[in-house]
Structure formats: structure tokens, C-alpha cells
Amino acid sequence: MPIYKYRARTQSGGISNGSVEAASEQAAIELLEDKGLVVLSLSAGAGGAKKGFNINIGGVKSKDIVIFSRQLSVMVSATVPIVQALKILAQQTVNVVFIEKILEMANDVDGGMKLSFAMAKHEKIFSRFYVAMVKSGETSGQLDDVLQYLADQMEKDYDLISRIKGAMIYPVFIICGMIAVGFLMMVFVVPKMTAMLIDSGAELPFLTKILISVSGFMQSFWWLIIGLAIGIFALFKVWLRSSGGRITWDTAKVKIPIFGPLFQKIYIVRFARSFATLTKGGVPVSSALKITAEVVDNEAYKKLIMDTIKEVEDGNSVATLFNKSELMPKMLSQMMSIGEQTGKLDAILEKLADFYTREIDNLVNGLTALIEPMILIVMGVGVGGMVAAIMLPMFKVAQSIS
């Protein structure tokens, strides 16, 4: 956690100098303002928590955070003090890492820190979206409702991701298995089977010659093939780390055949659901867009949303750039415009999120039904071609002998 040195004016008009520990510069400013200070200057200082004492074993799963949110919501609604509620939750939590973090939050809150700031210190567990919603709940006095709402939204996201992963496991497993078996066949099995054909001296079909050439190359240079595959993968990862590479790749993902529409709808659901939740919680539009840009987890969409912030700050509609972009469907931008005009933007965004979630379900079911026969066709062509390349010359040799 970084430490920021500040110079601020107190309520009495005096000057106060000191340091504050916070997750970010903005969090430090908000923390000082909560103490009644007017920040004159703020700079990052050296120091902070020693990393050697923050070694985590394992991690905190989404399921743990959902349960935590629901239980904390119940205790807050029952007027249990936050510090006491956190300590009770620490006793009921199984995850050792999470227990440590909950107790840290309890100590921070007991020391006068707001719950949202205490959560912001653990950014690997609580996202900016989560922290912003908790902060809005603290401000409006509806923390219990916000926590319950967050748990519901996280469950929806978890269900969506689980359905997509479940649908993709079978085809990915089959494709990887096909590649592995095909490689082993070409390196170890095919050379032995084709050796007798070469020794026979018979005229070999063109398909068999290709199979023998490919098999011979793979047998002699298998190390080169594996090395090239690893090298290409490594270069691809390095390219993705660059800003231009990431934007290019994230843009391409929504345009590729078959899977492109699926990716696009996933990002739209993340945007609509997150933005709706934040605006419903009273978060300013510009701040809500900034947080949503991080939640979407796609650099192309992030750039579009960040550009939209400038439009909103200039007094334009949120849907202005969306209406011009190929990344956003026309229906989304049109419905958002209606939502702004009627003052029901959050409700319309929730409806859009539900609509595109159903679209994702239909796409996943359709892809599952489409991928299975495609895999069977590819397997049939591959196995059939290999068998034909080996068996046809064998029949010719057998006929010539007889």
C-alpha cells in the first residue's frame, strides 16, 4: 500500500503536513477530505507496507466474496456494528487468506477508516467496481441493500462464465487431443507403416508421398516444430503486452467468424450490468464510466468508454460515440439515448443486460451444437486421409503380388 505525503488546510484555516496510506492518489484525497482537510498538495512518498509480510498462499474465489457480501448484508441490516460483523465473518470463513484480509479490514474500520477504503486496500480481492458500490451504499445509508445487490450481480457473472466455460471444455479437449495424437502418429507410427511401402518399390500415390514427406520432416525436426510453437506463443504474449497489440487483438476478437458475436455480447453484458449498477447506486456518470472501462476487460471497449467520458464532460450524450462505433450494436445506443431522455438509464441498461445474457445462452447452445459435427467432420477427413494414403498403396502391392 503506497504512502502519500500531503499538505492540507484544516477547517480552522491552519496548515497541516503529514502522510496517509491509501490504495491510490484519489483514495488518499478522499480519505483526507473525510477528515475535513482541504488538500493543497499530494505526492507519493517512499515506503509503504513491507511486501515480505504480505505473502499469500492461495487466493479468494468469487464464491467466497458472494457469501461474504450476503452475510455482511444481513448483519448490517440487523444493525450489527461493522467491526463486530467483520470479526464474526472472519470466524465463519474457511479461506485462510480471506480471514487475514477480513481481520485487517476490521482493524482499519476500528481505527476510523470507512469500509470502502478498507476494502480498497485489497484490490486483488475487491474490484474498483465493488469498492465504488460499497462507497455509494455508505453515502446513501443503504449499505445492506448494496451488498445484497453486489452478491446477486456476482452470481449472475459467475453463472455466465461457468456456462461459457462448460460449453467450451469439450471442443477444446477434443481439439487438443486430436493435435497431440496426430503429432505422435506422424512422428512414431506413420514412418513404420510407410517404410514397407517405400521398400516395395511400387509407384506411390500423390497423397501417400505427401504423407511420407510430412511425416519425415516431423520425425527429423520435431524439436524445431515444438520450438517454433513455443517461440510464436512467447512472441504473441509479448505483443499482447503492448498497448497497440492488445487493442488490435481485442478488436479482432469481436470480428472473428463464429466466436466474434459471442465475445461482443459478453463485453456488452459486462458494460451494461456494471454501468447500470453504478448509476443506480448514485455514482456520477463519469466515475461510473471510468470504473466500467476496467470491468469490461477489453482494451478496445475500454478506449471507447474512456473517449465517452470526454463527451459526457463536454455535455454530450453517453450514447454519442456508441452510436458511431462498430463495437456497440445500434439497439444498445438507441435504447441508452431513450434512457437518458426519460431518466431511466439504469433500468434500461438492466433490461439490455438481461436481453444480451439470453442472447449469449442461445449463441452458446448454438455453438455447442455446431462445433460437435464440425469436429467429427475434421476427424473423419484427417483419419480418412491418413488411412487412404497408407491403405491404397498396400492394396496395390498386394494385387501386384497376387
Image: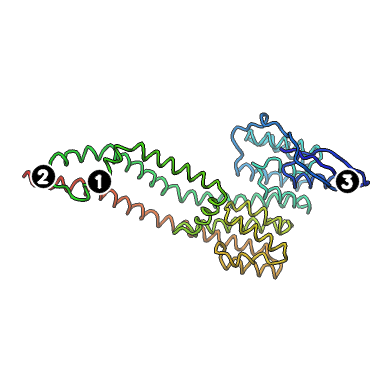
Amino acid carrying label 1: it is Leu
Residue 243 percent location from the top left of the image: 57, 50
Q: Answer with left or right where residue 20 lies relative to residue 288.
A: right
Q: CA distance from mark 1 to mark 2?
A: 20 Å
The residue tagged 3 is 9
Residue 121 lies, with reference to residue 145, above or below; the image says above
Q: How is the image coloured?
A: rainbow
> Of label 3 and label 2, which has the lower sequence position?
3
Which image quarter holds the N terminus?
A: top right
- Callout 3 environment at 10 Å: few (<14), some (14 to 19), or many (20+)? some
Total numbered circles: 3
Q: Answer with left or right where residue 273 lies relative to residue 14.
A: left
Q: CA distance from mark 3 to mark 1?
A: 80 Å
Image point 74% across, 35% down: which residue?
Answer: 46
**Does the residue at mark 3 contact the one at mark 1 (Cβ under 8 Å)?**
no
The residue tagged 1 is 211
- Provide the secondary structure element on which disc 2 rests: helix
Amino acid carrying label 3: it is Arg
Seen from the viewer's position, the closer of residues 7 and 393 is 7
The residue tagged 2 is 398
